Image (cartoon, rainbow, N blue to C red):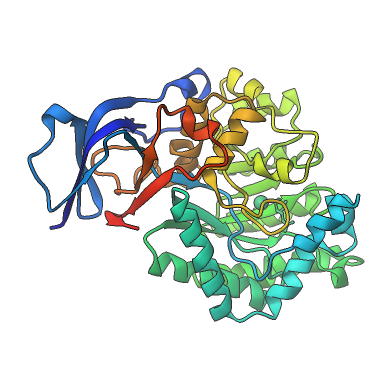
């Protein structure tokens, strides 16, 4: 048996039993033990508590004087598998073209799909692995990854196989989401239902037969899929037992929230534009609102999700990166925390709950990760010396994660 003892931890953060979504006023409670130890045995958290109760020795010992230990971030919304960056669109936007105008012209997601279709599975895997390692370096230990840059049967399967390989070969906890309905390819724009047929009748059965997806997603938006199209796809997913995590209310409120709730979606993601009625609908559902503040930041959008109102109405929100080449070319969860605080006016404690345990619940991995609890998987990170937990979102440009430990292995 291998063991790691982390001693003299200035603050051991998020020591909740942690198997439930933290909601409303409770989001500002963040359990912390000062002057603590953490004992890891094999890949699990074996014990933790005040330093006076620390065991004498372990195989490996780490002194964490002045440093803090957090459970790894749970990033519940990413598009980590893509073939190329899109900084040319970044410049187009500076010159005045909007994201929606670019998408309507066949840029955006279709631009990524063209490149991915020409890229081999091996090359995609190598690129994705490098990005995942970067995510781990920034403190992420569990991550959801979507397909959606393939948009053909072969290429969607190719992405999902890359995700499966990442699951098999790395220490990160990974969930896969089938997002064949990310954009309508140009050749289907005058016959949209034929593309929905392809997703529902060709792609989905193969994805399920190979066991490649844990969830199904649809980009429900004016520039992407309508409510009726979203319903067809979620219904098909439900027949195969795939829960939904849907992109909705990024630019418009079209009724995606209502549809998602109707299908018992695990989460609704984005919510930059959200009505009071939709907040109430969410309040009476089990669907988790997942906020992605780096996307409107990068697009320089006026609207941001009304996190304060949501929390005040009793909702539990999750925070995630939305890492993708079009709207968030960053996999850095600490920056998401910063924007959660700065733009969404979440308190640091609320943002940390949203990025750890609530992200875990949004991926159905709350019994394994998302907090420091005995028996959970030892996915944690040690910070550099920091004065307080508030310093983490405050010092938004710094790299404050010193060491990541995943499944008991130091990275
Ligand atoms: O979540 N909104 C849809 N999908 C991504 C962006 C995809 C892209 O532009 O490549 C998002 O923001
Ligand atoms: Fe997204």
| Nearer to the camera, 292 or 215 | 292
Q: In this view, does 225 lie above or below 193?
A: above
Please tell me which residue is depicted at 54% across the width and 31% down the height of the picture.
Answer: 394
Which quadrant is the N terminus positioned in?
Answer: bottom left
Please tell me which residue is depicted at 38% across the width and 41% down the height of the picture.
Answer: 383
| Nearer to the camera, 53 or 248 | 53
Q: Where is residue 356 in the image (x, y as percent from the top left)?
A: 45, 39
| Nearer to the camera, 222 or 15 | 15
Q: Is residue 297 visible?
A: yes
Q: Where is residue 411 in the image (x, y as percent from the top left)?
A: 35, 58
Please tell me which residue is depicted at 20% across the width and 55% down the height of the picture.
Answer: 42
Among the 4 quarters of the image, the one containing residue 19 = top left
Q: Where is residue 388 in the image (x, y as percent from the top left)?
A: 41, 27
Q: Can residue 287 be seen in this view?
A: no
11 left or right, relative to 298: left
373 left or right, relative to 341: left
Please tell me which residue is depicted at 87% across the width and 73% down the height of the picture.
Answer: 187
182 left or right, relative to 190: left
Q: Position of residue 98 (x, y in %)?
A: 87, 49
Among the 4 quarters of the image, the one containing residue 318 = top right
């Amino acid at each position: 048996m291998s063991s790691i003892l982390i001693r003299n931890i200035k603050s051991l953060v998020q020591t909740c039993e942690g198997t439930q979504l933290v909601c409303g006023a409770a989001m500002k409670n963040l359990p912390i033990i000062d002057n603590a130890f953490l004992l890891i045995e094999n890949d699990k958290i074996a014990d933790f508590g005040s330093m006076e109760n620390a065991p004498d020795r372990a195989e490996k010992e780490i002194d964490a004087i002045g440093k803090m230990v957090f459970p790894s971030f749970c990033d519940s919304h990413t598009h980590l598998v893509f073939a190329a960056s899109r900084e040319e669109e970044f410049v187009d936007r500076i010159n005045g073209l909007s994201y929606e105008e670019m998408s309507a012209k066949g840029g955006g997601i279709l631009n990524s799909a063209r490149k991915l279709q020409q890229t081999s599975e091996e090359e995609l895997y190598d690129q994705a692995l490098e990005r995942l390692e970067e995510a781990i370096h920034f403190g992420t230990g569990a991550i959801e990854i979507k397909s959606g840059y393939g948009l053909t049967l072969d290429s969607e399967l190719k992405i999902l196989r890359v995700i499966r390989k990442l699951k098999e070969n790395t220490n990160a906890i990974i969930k896969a989401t089938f997002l064949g309905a990310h954009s309508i390819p140009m050749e289907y724009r005058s016959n949209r239902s034929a593309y929905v047929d392809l997703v529902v009748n060709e792609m989905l059965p193969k994805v399920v037969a190979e066991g490649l997806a844990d969830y199904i997603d649809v980009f429900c938006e004016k520039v992407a899929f309508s409510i009726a199209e979203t319903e067809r796809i979620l219904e098909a997913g439900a027949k195969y037992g795939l829960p939904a995590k849907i992109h909705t209310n990024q630019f418009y409120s079209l009724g995606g929230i209502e549809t998602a709730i109707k299908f018992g979606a695990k989460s609704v993601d984005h919510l930059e534009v959200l009505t009071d009625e939709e907040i109430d609908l969410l309040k009476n559902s089990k669907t988790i609102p997942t906020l992605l503040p780096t996307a409107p930041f990068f697009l320089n959008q006026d609207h941001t999700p009304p996190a304060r109102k949501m929390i005040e109405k009793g909702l539990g929100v999750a925070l995630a990166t939305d890492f993708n080449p079009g709207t968030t070319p960053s996999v850095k969860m600490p920056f998401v925390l910063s924007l959660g605080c700065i733009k969404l006016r979440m308190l640091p404690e609320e943002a940390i709950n949203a990025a750890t345990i609530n992200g875990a619940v949004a991926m159905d991995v709350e019994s394994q990760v998302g907090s420091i609890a005995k028996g959970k998987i030892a996915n944690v990170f040690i910070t550099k010396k920091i004065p307080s937990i508030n310093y983490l979102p405050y010092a938004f440009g710094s790299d404050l994660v010193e060491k990541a430990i995943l499944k008991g292995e130091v990275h």
